[in-house]
Image: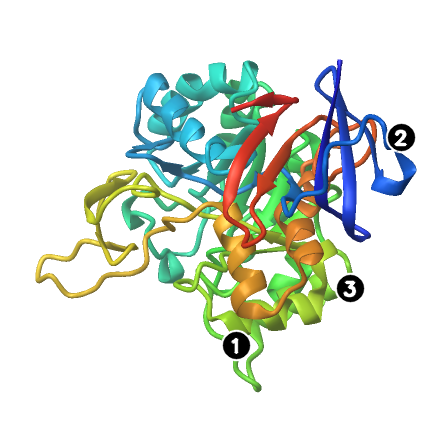
Amino acid sequence: MTELFRGTVVTPSGTIDDGVLALADGLIAAVGPAAAFSAATLPAPSDRVYLPGMIDVHCHGGGGFDFPGSDVDGARAAAAHHLGRGTTTLLASLVSAAPEKLLERIATLAPLVDDDTVAGLHLEGPFLAQEVCGAQDPRYILDGDPALLATLLDAAGGRIRSMTVAAETPHFADLARQLSAAGAVVSVGHTAGDYDTVARALGTPDGPVSITHLFNGMPPMHHRHPGAVGAALAVAGEGRAVAEIIGDGVHLAAGTVAMVFATVGPDHVALVSDAMQAAGMPDGQYSLGPLEVTVGGGVARLTTPDGTPGPIAGGTSSVLDVVVRAVRHSGVSLADAARAGATTPARLLGLHDRGELAAGLRADVLELSADLELQRVLRGGRQV
């Protein structure tokens, strides 16, 4: 049975103002202007807006649960929270922890990868730079260790899809080769490396490369010391890496988001949530891995003994929230924002069956109102 949806249809090449999506058997059967379809079968025109399901390559949790600490049921609840907010594909992100803890988390989360609750695992650490560790526990940050990485990759059995590694960590080239050989994205981040070190690291892997939350977890750019930010913008601007950005109004200013889109282009930008367990929850006390987090006004920060604001500790938004904010506050076109929220992340992960509204792809579809409020989520053609 074919189901038709009519409204504004957003595709990577642009927006169809009066468009139609035809869904059948969990797939997108056809996309095009309403004039190309039989008038006898068409629904009435509507002001609905249709986007592809969002794809989050950096997400630690939500709905009161998280991937670094919750049991399997809690981890499923975290994934469900984001699914209900338009993220039809996500990676479950971990944080730096003792090796035995990472192995335990890999085993706990493996069933979620196997049943497609999540598309894989993202390890944010432990091979990071101490001086820009942010909300990572410095006790568990280690120098690059190819033997430990081999143990983690072996335990994961192909389920690790991305890993954040500092450019200056020892044995970076060896780690990058291991990750690429395992089919994982090498994501350079939490790095204090200089321009040349970071540019060289981004050019090392044989497979896909990204920058973990550009600007966050790295020193600010200076005109005489461009550092990691300058290298990331240059390499991504050349089309050789994808820059993650957390455009939630907390991690980055609206103008910074606009600049990255203008400089790098939506084909090399991945909008991410970096969400932690407080996403979708009231202000209060939460955790991120072993660290305590205080959320006030929707902003998550590490809890400090004297109550002063600590470092930002992840996000409390969804990717769709970030996409809509890019449109409303940064002047990014809806087509470009949707591309960065779905199409580019899909290509980064090698997921060729989703990420855009095109015939033959999985029917991951978001229905929004004219003012971009989420109305319905379909994953594989089934309403969530």
Please identify the residue farthest to the bottom as the structure is shown: 224
- The mark that comes first in sequence, 2 or 1, is 2
Residue 181 vertical position relative to residue 49 in the rendered view, above or below: above
Residue 161 vertical position relative to residue 133 in the rendered view, above or below: above
Could you tell me residue 309's position as x and y percent?
Answer: 20, 64
Determine the residue positioned at 77% across, 47% down.
Answer: 18
- The residue that disc 2 covers is 38
Residue 161 in sight in this render? yes
- Which of these two is toward me, 97 or 342? 342
- The mark that comes first in sequence, 3 or 2, is 2
Q: CA distance from mark 3 to mark 2?
A: 44 Å
Around disc 1, counting alpha carbons within 10 Å, would you say few (fewer than 14), some (14 to 19), or many (20 or more)?
some
Could you tell me residue 1's position as x and y percent?
Answer: 75, 13
Is mark 3 in CB contact (under 8 Å) with mark 2?
Answer: no
Could you tell me residue 249's position as x and y percent?
Answer: 43, 64
Q: CA distance from mark 1 to mark 3?
A: 18 Å
Q: Secondary structure at mark 2?
A: loop
Mark nearest the camera among 3 and 2 is: 2
Around disc 3, counting alpha carbons within 10 Å, would you say few (fewer than 14), some (14 to 19), or many (20 or more)?
few
- The residue that disc 3 covers is 238
Residue 287 lies left or right of residue 45; in this view the side is left
- The residue that disc 1 covers is 221
